[in-house]
Image: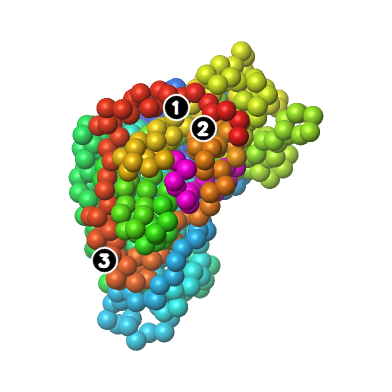
Amino acid sequence: MNTYTITFLPDHKTIEIEAGATLLEAQRRAGYIPDAPCGGRGKCGKCTVEIVDGAVPGRQKSCTFYIKSDLTVRLPDLTAKNQILAEGRSRTVDADPWLPEELKETSNVYLAAVDLGTTTIAAYLLDAKSGHNIAVSLCLNPQAPYGADVINRCEYALNGGEDILAECVRQSIDQLIQEMVQETGISREQIAGISLAGNSCMQHLFLHWPVNSLAAAPYLPHSKESVCGLASEYGIHIHSEGKIWVLPVIESFVGADTLACIMSAGLEKREKLTLMIDIGTNGELVLAKGGRLLTCSTAAGPALEGAKISCGMRGGTGAIDHVTLDENKNLAYSVIGGGEPKGICGSGLLDLTACLLKLGIIDESGFMEEDYKISDRVSLTKRDVREVQLAKAAIAAGINIMCDIWEINLEDIEDVLIAGAFGNYMNPASACAIGLLPREFLNKVSLIGNAAGEGAKLAVLNKQEFERSCQLASGVEFLELANRPEFQDTFVDELSFAQEV
């Protein structure tokens, strides 16, 4: 088979690749993480590149362009820095980790914790004796070019991509460990163990578990059990006897990341009626009071993370992150890193929708006469508005049905904890203005940051905390929204936008 040379600008990286491969595949093999939220199906256009030297010069979708000659390709700006949330609020525990025998009497011993997200990965290096966090390393999930959401990644795995998806994320975690040991000057052999918390799909892919039961009704995990094994068996290089502790999942699409959030927020100990929401591609909700925990997952989709939006992008350099109205009702916006905007991220999308509702440009049904141009390069389309409606309706329906199950009113909820990256940057007033959150929540919202990462830290710092996570997981009540006869009607009702708060 013929092979061809592909040169990527602006960094002049070259690879050899066989004829018939796509440019998207060439980018993946070259080590790039191209923006391809549709998973390479030719639907989103986010993977468009410029061919500057080759048989067909010009802008092309890299996922549908098949290589038949040598090419020089200019990629989108690769210098943009993405905002990846690392910090979170958590309770504290005494350090009492499991340690290999030869490290028990050693003073300089360390642990690692990983929050494995659909979009991003956060790794933490901890002092095993004091529990202090001494380094953090972050990256985009390298599985992203295979699909922005878990369904697309399950489909890719089922079509023979299990090895690729498992290997790329294991390599990324190992690389994050390497970055932290280089930063601190320690050796990998001083790291005694590592914990990992992710959503159900991410953990299945990491562990190389089959995902067929997750991808089709009734959407059951291959296993809900925790995993403890040698880290080296999963391509993670730490102490030769160092173990990896993978937290259990609660159910189908309520994973170990939600369990880690419960642990870090101490939800099982709260006497006040509390709702925790982690808003992402899936929206996980947990209602808590007096030791009782009820959880569900809603398919919010990736719109609030910038995917499926015409000018959407991740929260990084060049993204519009907030939009406001001045005293003359003119739009004003801020751009991460300053300069001209290249796109809009989830928090900016939320603000923009709220502002256009206030101006009457979008009505309560979601109707907008024409696409709205916010800058030379950034517009909001009618289809974008629809994606926002679908995302917010999924979250709002979940909240309402959980309240019905517990026979409580929205105003009865005393504390609302928002976890995760999107929630950390969103304006709660905008969320309430469009009905993503009920207006009753406006003055009750607290942002708790990367609670999943904080929970993963607890699990590796204290062996009793890991054991407690297993008990917690089995005691959480799970609500399968799809099985509720009222879900569809509630979802449809919530598609309309709320009145301005």
Q: Earlier in the sequence, mark 1 or mark 3?
A: 3
Residue stretch in magenta: 410-428
Q: Nearer the viewer, residue 306 or 327?
A: 327
Front-most of residues 437 and 403 = 403
Q: Position of residue 224 (x, y in %)?
A: 22, 50
In the foreground, 370 or 484? 484
The residue identified by callout 2 is 435
**Of label 2 and label 3, which has the lower sequence position?**
2
**Residue at disc 1, secondary structure:** loop
The local crowd at label 3, few if under 14, some if 14 to 19, many if 20 or more residues have their Cα within 10 Å, is few
Q: Distance of mark 1 from mark 3, alpha carbons? A: 39 Å
Where is residue 356? Give x, y as percent: 64, 25
Q: Residue at x 32, y 58 (%)?
A: 291
**On the rendered image, what quadrant is the C terminus found in?**
top right
Q: Are marks 1 and 2 in contact (CB under 8 Å)?
A: yes
- 29 vs 373, left or right, is left
* Measured Cα–Cα span from mark 2 to mark 3: 38 Å
How many marks can you see?
A: 3
483 sits left or right of 490 in the view: left
- Amino acid type indicated by mark 2: Gly
Number of the label disc, if any, that sits on residue 467 = 3
Q: Which residue is mark 1?
A: 494
Amino acid on which the number 3 mark rests in the picture: Glu
For the residue pair 207 and 501, the one nearer the viewer reads as 501
Residue at x 47% of width, y 32% of height: 392
Gap between marks 1 and 2 measured at Cα: 8 Å
Q: Residue furthest right?
A: 328
Residue 40 appears in the rendering: no
The kind of residue tagged 1 is Glu
Q: Tell me if I can see residue 407 in this picture.
A: yes
